[in-house]
């Protein structure tokens, strides 16, 4: 059974930093693209960042570019999202996702595997 488990969410003041982790189990995702999405109350799930299989390429939403960094450690079957210079509008539930295929996508429907989500709250 495939599982993705996020950790690292919490409450932080604006301008602060948080790091999220997503540990995968049940299969190896080293060749699979992985991503991070977020969903704020009353809003649709939106793309945050993605990384290709083996970590060759990354992509970011314009709203987080230059502040967030996605990475992966294939030996640990884990992906990460380092979030710096956080803003109140970054407040959301953050989900990690993985897809079959090495090329990343910004569309939630392209990802078959999802974590349960972790809350990130940024206070002003």
Image (tube, rainbow, N blue to C red):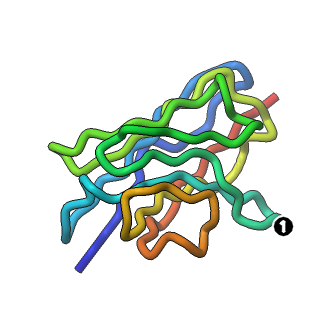
In the rendered image, which quarter contains the N terminus?
bottom left
How far across and down, in percent of the image, does residue 120 sit?
Answer: 62, 45
* Quarter-of-image position of residue 123: top right
At 22% from the left and 64% from the top, the residue drawn is 25
Q: Quadrant of residue 26?
A: bottom left
Q: Image point 35% across, 40% down: which residue? A: 55
Q: Is residue 68 left or right of residue 97?
A: right
Q: Which residue is mark 1?
A: 42
Residue for point 45% across, 39% down: 57
Within-10-Å neighbours for mark 1: few <14, some 14–19, many 20+: few
Who is closer to the viewer here, 6 or 47? 47
Say which residue appears at 71% left-offset and 58% top-offset. Answer: 46
Residue 33 image point, x, y percent: 40, 56
Vertical comparison of 22 with 116: above or below = above
Viewer-closest of 74 and 118: 74
Location of residue 44 in the rendering, given as x and y in whole percent from the top left corner: 77, 67
Find residue 122 and report its horizontal and vertical position in percent: 71, 35
Position of 35 compared to 67: left or right? left
Give whichever of 64, 93 is nearer the camera. 64
Tell me if residue 2 comes above or below residue 15 in the rendering.
below
* SS label for mark 1: loop
The answer to whether 25 appears left or right of 64 in the picture is left
Number of numbered discs overlaid on the protein picture:
1
| Quadrant that contains the C terminus | top right
Residue sticking out furthest to the left: 75
């Amino acid at each position: 059974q495939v599982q993705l488990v996020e950790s690292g969410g919490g409450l932080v003041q604006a301008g602060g930093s948080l790091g999220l982790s997503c540990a995968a189990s049940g299969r190896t995702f080293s060749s699979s693209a992985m991503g991070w999405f977020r969903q704020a109350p009353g809003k649709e799930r939106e793309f945050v960042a993605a990384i290709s299989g083996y970590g060759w390429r990354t992509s970011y939403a314009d709203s987080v570019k230059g502040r967030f960094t996605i990475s992966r450690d294939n030996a640990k079957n884990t992906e990460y999202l380092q979030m710096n210079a956080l803003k109140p509008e970054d407040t959301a539930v953050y989900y990690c996702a993985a897809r079959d295929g090495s090329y990343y996508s910004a569309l939630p429907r392209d990802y078959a595997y999802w974590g349960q989500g972790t809350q990130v709250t940024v206070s002003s």
